[in-house]
Image: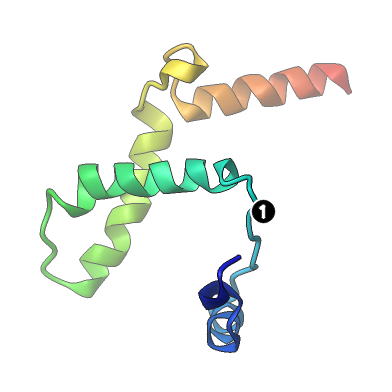
Amino acid sequence: HGSQYMSDAFQKELRFLSIENSPAFVRAPEGNGCAERFIRTLKENLLWVRTFDTVEALRQAPLEFRDTYNATWLIEQHGFKPPTAVRQDQLSTAALAA
């Protein structure tokens, strides 16, 4: 909610990039916590440990990391299951409830 995020220049950049602005609630920063933690994970496990010869290689790297993360990372909070398994469980549960 800082002035830099509400500035016309920032808002125009969001529109140009087709990004929807979704600010956190005042005094409730935990909404950004998940995103900030993932960015830290991305930096520590990809951007700070690899170099990229081309812009295209840099552009592809986070996409590949996303796929690896979702398919193979075991998340303690989810009973040491990868995100894709958790999503599949949730979809199965939702289908049974419908």
**Position of residue 79 in the picture relative to residue 60 (left or right):** right
Q: Indicate whether 38 appears above or below 25.
A: above
User: In this figure, which residue is indicated by the disc labeled 1?
Assistant: 26
Quadrant showing the N terminus = bottom right
Tell me the crowding category of disc 1: few under 14, some 14 to 19, or many 20 or more residues within 10 angstroms, Cα based: few
Q: Is residue 73 left or right of residue 55?
A: right
Name the quarter where the C terminus is drawn: top right
Q: Residue at x 22, y 64 (%)?
A: 57
Q: Closest to the observer: 38 or 72?
A: 38
Depicted 81 relative to depicted 3: above or below: above
With respect to residue 34, does 79 lie above or below? Answer: above
Quick one: which residue is furthest to the top in this view?
79
Quadrant housing residue 97: top right
Helix, strand or loop at mark 1: loop
Q: Position of residue 66 (x, y in %)?
A: 39, 45
Q: Is residue 22 above or below residue 95?
A: below
Residue type highlighted by circle 1: Val
- Front-most of 3 and 63? 3
Rendered location of residue 25, percent (x, y): 68, 52
Q: Nearer the viewer, residue 88 or 12?
A: 12
Q: Quadrant of residue 41?
A: top left
Residue most extreme to the right: 98
User: x%, y% of residue 87?
Assistant: 59, 28
Q: Quadrant of residue 16?
A: bottom right
At 58% from the left edge and 83% from the top edge, which residue is drawn?
7
